[in-house]
Amino acid sequence: MLKIKRVPTVVSNYQKDEAADESVGCGRNCLGACCINGARLPLYACKNLEKSREKIVVSHEAEEPPVAFLESLVLGEWEDRFQRGLFRYDVTACETKVIPGKYGFVAQLNEGRHLKKRPTEFRVDKVLQSFDGSKFNFTKVGQEELLFQFEAGEDGQVQFFPCMPLDPENSFSVVAINVSPIEYGHVLLIPRVLDCLPQRIDHKSLLLAVHMAAEAANPYFRLGYNSLGAFATINHLHFQAYYLAMPFPLERAPTKKMITTVSGVKISELLNYPVRSLLFEGGSSMQDLSDTVSDACVCLQNNNIPFNILIADCGRQIFVMPQCYAEKQALGEVSPEVLETQVNPAVWEISGHMVLKRKEDYEGASEENAWRLLAEASLSEERFKEVNTLIFEAIGCSDQEEDLEGTIVHQQIPNGGVNQKSNRIHGGPITNGTASECIVLQ
Ligand SMILES: [Zn+2]
């Protein structure tokens, strides 16, 4: 059993009080049986993506408000909590810069995020661990940290109820603030919060996260996921999300197509990126795409391989990044200079948003340093191949490898929106581009 000292990031103001009094009306206005009676929260039921697609065909009415409603809800409620002083520090005061170079890594100096250190023993060698109600979990957050209930609606239209009772019988999902934000609008999506699910991908929950990305309708709003062993610090199922108004380097990496599933989901590997990763896109529906990614993640979980997920391009692109940083760290195989930065390469760092804790690392930030740090998290080429074989077996594509005819797609996103596709390997044909293959940022 590998164990390392880990300092968890405090994501809720109630995480600090471990010995809480659980008597009736515990005084913290939490989500437990003590406080939930009579509690209310806005409910946002997003439109059924399939139905809304049909609807567009038959109706030419402009039903969409000019600004995506979900975006104004997230940011409006987030701003309200900011004004109420619920965050541990002012993230808008954190310095951020784009690291010069061709990859566009983003560095942020965030000295507040890891203050008040309370070291705990955190088991890093098991991706699946059962839920432990005695540890901090999201049923213990204060209701003021919750922004709204979120559900995948049945209807072709968005439904919004400003004041909906929290019904413990109806396992609702919530969007909450992360009290240690790394960007403006940093929130948590907690699927079926009262079901107390451990941090583990299941098909229904990933689809809910993909729905949220689609519903936000803004390519700068991404959702991320860290498995246990890949820097999740709370074993209670949650996704993170925030706005970053620039492309992540991960999104800009060229890709090489590996296989296409029977449902049309295209799986590519990233080229020329420090962390070997897979990109899933396409498919006949958002559910096909989400289900394929879930199959892959369930496979990783069952094989005890830690991983991160980035849901980008309004849910049309999903990156899966298996990683081994914590394992290497526990085995003493991470280089000392990288370790000294104390940066944990979780989903945002791996996507290229480097949240740095030390001023000297921020001031001396360079592409080489970012690359060196992220490369420590990557599987070796050989291990990555083995893992891909496992994944392709799990999704029923084991004999469809198209390595020799791989097509490289260069994605160049910023401003000009240039999408240059080339087929440098073996002169294969250029694939027919569809909208879902390109990221177009507004
Ligand atoms: Zn309570």
Image (cartoon, grey):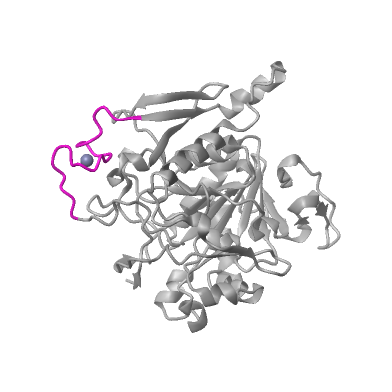
Percent across and percent down for residue 408 are 77, 58
In which image quadrant can residue 302 be found?
Answer: bottom left
Percent across and percent down for residue 379 are 55, 69
Q: Which residues are magenta?
A: 19-40
> Position of 102 compared to 148: left or right?
right
Determine if the magenta segment contains residue 29. Answer: yes
Percent across and percent down for residue 346 are 49, 62
> Position of 26 compared to 282: left or right?
left
In which image quadrant can residue 426 be found?
Answer: bottom right
> Position of 184 compared to 202: left or right?
right
Of helix, strand and loop, which mostly describes the magenta segment? loop
Q: Quadrant of ligand 1?
A: top left
Percent across and percent down for residue 98 are 65, 64
Q: Against 161, is 384 above or below?
A: below
In which image quadrant can residue 123 be found?
Answer: bottom left
Which residue: 43% across, 44% down? 83
Q: Nearer the viewer, residue 203 or 243?
A: 243
Instruction: Name the residue at the left extreme.
Output: 23
Q: Quadrant of the C terminus?
A: top right
Q: Nearer the viewer, residue 28 or 93?
A: 93
Q: Quadrant of the N terminus?
A: bottom left
Q: Nearer the viewer, residue 405 or 322?
A: 322
Determine if the magenta segment contains residue 256. Answer: no
Figure label count: 0
